[in-house]
Amino acid sequence: MSTANRTKLAVFALLTVGAASAGTAAPAVLALAAVTALIPVADALDRKPAARPDRRPAPEREPV
C-alpha cells in the first residue's frame, strides 16, 4: 500500500474512532467506517497489473 493511502487510512480510522467516542450519530460513524474500509480496496484497484512477458517470435520456416 502506498504511503499516501496509509496516511489516509490512519486519518480516517482516527476520525471514525473520534466520532464514535464523541457520540456522533450512528449514520455518520457508519459512513466514516465505510469510507475507511474502501481505502484499501481503492488502493488495490489503482495498482497496475504486472507487465506481461514479451512473446518470442515464431520460428521461421524454410521454404519448400
Image (spheres, grey):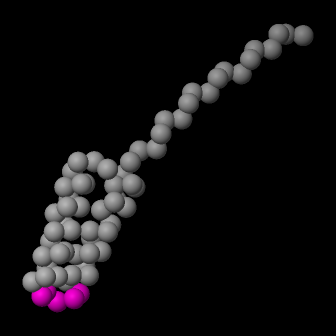
Q: Quadrant of residue 12?
A: bottom left
In the displayed structure, would residue 58 be above or below residue 25? above
Q: Is residue 31 magenta?
A: no
Query: What residue lies at 80% left-to-right and 14% top-to-bottom?
Result: 61
In the displayed structure, would residue 1 be above or below residue 30? above
Pick whichever, 35 or 57, lies toward us. 35
Q: Which residues are magenta?
A: 23-27
Pick whichever, 57 or 51, lies toward us. 51
Q: In the visual, does 33 lie left or right of 15?
A: right
Query: What residue lies at 25% left-to-right and 54% top-to-bottom?
Result: 5
Q: Residue farthest to the top?
A: 63
Query: What residue lies at 22% left-to-right and 88% top-to-bottom?
Result: 26
Q: Residue farthest to the right?
A: 64
Q: Is residue 25 magenta?
A: yes
Q: Residue farthest to the left?
A: 22
Q: Quadrant of residue 7?
A: bottom left
Q: Quadrant of the C terminus?
A: top right
Q: Quadrant of residue 42?
A: bottom left
Picture coordinates of residue 47, whole percent (x, y)? 38, 48
Secondary structure mainly formed by the magenta segment: loop
Query: Across the whole image, how many numbered discs are drawn on residues?
Result: 0
Q: In the visual, does 25 lie left or right of 40?
A: left
Picture coordinates of residue 40, whole percent (x, y)? 34, 60
In the displayed structure, would residue 23 be above or below residue 1? below
